[in-house]
Image (tube, coloured by chain):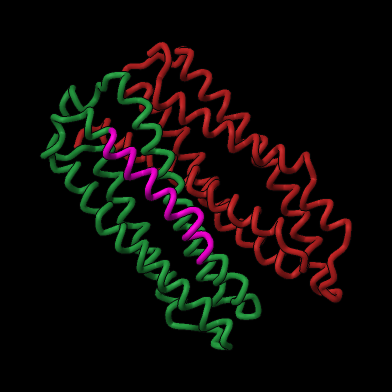
Chain colours: A red, B green
Amino acid sequence: MTTYDWLLFAHVTGAFALLGGAVAAAVFSLSALRRERPSEIAVLLGLTRVAVVAVVAGSILTLVFGLWLVHEAHYGYGDGWILAAIALWIVGSVTGEAGGRRDARTRELAERLAREGDAATSELRARLRDPLSLALSYGSGAAMLAILVLMVWKPGA
Amino acid sequence: MTPLAFLRPSSWDLPLFVHLLGAFGLVGGVLATVTLAAGARRRSEHAPLLTSLALRTLLVVVVPAFVVMRVGAQWILSKEKYAENSDWVGIGFGISDVGAIVVVALAILAWRAARRVRAGDLHPRSGTLVAGLGSLYLAALAVAWWAMTTKPGA
């Protein structure tokens, strides 16, 4: 195997961790949206932490080995599709992190309510369906999907 | 790796995108299933919810993603005739073929686990098998993407 092969494998492994983790996080979050009992919402949002580990590890791997690949494959760091991918990576990471922080606060509320009688409240329902939280999470996913489009089509390469 | 494996015509981009979408969905769906099945063992008070969600994830995410991944793979191969007999395609299709059986087995085991949990057995063996077999399948998928990226024998 050449250096390029190893770098591409590490980069693609990062992409699988990142996007696979994002899919898993979406499964847990969407399942939590359909529940009423705070204890069930708390356990489902708690599982997203497993997915977040994959997403964070994948984000780092894709960026580090992606930049290394640019050098190894003799692309230019100033190429439009690479700059666009880096910009989207930053947007996706920032929005994903912000959405994740809001979800963590929702999980903490659900855990507290679960300890205090496990009765659903309008505050918890509102936080689960908070348009800003949903927009941040979906926006992060859309940015990652856009990066995948750039990686496949490589416009201008 | 040959230059042919490195450079691909733009007409392969859409099939590759479809294949990758399915593959990412498959990995994410299996990861979610394994996490739910393992979570059901650790949080027995929520085992009925988590085992039923593991089954639903298999049916709603894993199975459709597998089909999309496989359709994308066939689509690429129809354009990539030179690769038909290469090792990396053989590895990919081998793991995919066995994977179809594994996905069916996972669905049966997840269904059994959900049924057993509803019947009062909060730690069914079938639930443990979903987590174990799902983890092995994730490892096999990693071998598949290693073969797809490094193309041994190309």
Q: Is residue B65 magenta?
A: yes
Q: Quadrant of residue A117?
A: bottom right
Q: Which residues are magenta?
A: B55-75
Q: Residue at x 43, y 78 (%)?
A: B126
Q: Seen from this angle, which residue lies furthest bottom?
A: B120
Where residue B53 appears, as percent x and y from the top left, is: 57, 65
Where residue A25 appears, as percent x and y from the top left, is: 59, 52
Residue A46 placement, left or right of B77:
right
Residue B100 placement, left or right of A24:
left
Where residue B64 appears, as percent x and y from the top left, is: 44, 50
Identify whether A152 is placed above or below B35: above
Q: Quadrant of residue B15?
A: top left
Identify whether A47 is placed above or below A70: below
Identify whether A151 is placed above or below A93: above
The secondary structure making up most of the magenta span is: helix
Tell which of B26 and A9 is nearer to you: B26
Q: Residue at x 58, y 51 (%)?
A: A52
Q: Residue at x 20, y 29 (%)?
A: B80
Q: Is residue A107 magenta?
A: no
Where residue A107 appears, as percent x and y from the top left, is: 74, 59
Count of residue discs: 0
Q: Residue at x 49, y 53 (%)?
A: B61
Query: The N terminus of chain B lies in which quarter of the figure?
Result: top left
Q: Seen from this angle, which residue lies furthest right?
A: A122
Query: The C terminus of chain B lies in which quarter of the figure?
Result: top left
